[in-house]
Amino acid sequence: MGKPVVYFLCTGNSCRSQMAEAWLKHLGGEHYEVLSAGLEAHGLNPRAIQVMKEAGIDITGHTSDVIHPDILNRATYVITLCGHADEHCPVISNKNVIKWHWGFNDPAQATGTEEEIMNQFRSVRDAIKARIEQFLTELPQK
């Protein structure tokens, strides 16, 4: 049997789900197959790329993808990172999937100076990292 599949979902697969995918791959990727997608594909947010690079993780090779039904239905964990994705997630036919909602503010909606906006991205990045670390300590490694 393969590794458990963790599928992070967001509205546009441009910020939060990309950060979550990168953190889990970085911190525990040897134990999981990690993917992310969105209800739509908005492309990678340049600020998300920048703040992840500041943390030592390069996500420039990531793609912004739309939720794929086959991945959704073979996932072990489906984790939504925004309320919109949680409310509009497609029906999952796999009854064994574990679905969680981890709500994080959308840094792409931040306003203010460039530094204030970047600080929102850093705050969300760090909150997602902390939640991924909690996920890894709570679950048995396969």
Image (spheres, rainbow, N blue to C red):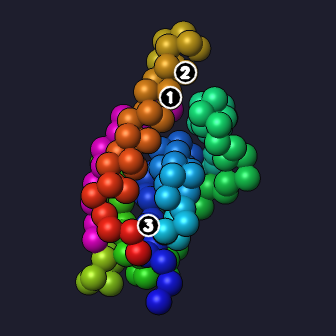
Magenta segment boundaries in residue numbering: 98-110
| Element at label 1 | helix
Whether label 2 touches label 1, CB < 8 Å: yes
| Dot label at residue 6 | 3
Whether label 2 touches label 3, CB < 8 Å: no
Q: Is residue 125 left or right of residue 87?
A: right
In primary-sequence order, the first of circles 2 and 3 is: 3
Q: Distance between the residues labelled 3 and 1?
A: 23 Å
**Label 3 Cα neighbours within 10 Å, binned few <14 / some 14-19 / many ≥20:** many
Whether label 3 touches label 1, CB < 8 Å: no
Return the residue found at the far bottom.
Answer: 1
* Residue pictured at 43% horizontal, 58% vertical: 9
* Residue pictured at 44% horizontal, 41% vertical: 129
* Residue pictured at 28% horizontal, 71% vertical: 98
Q: Nearer the viewer, residue 47 or 132?
A: 132
Q: How far apart are marks 2 and 1 (CA)?
A: 5 Å
Q: Position of residue 10 (x, y in %)?
A: 44, 52
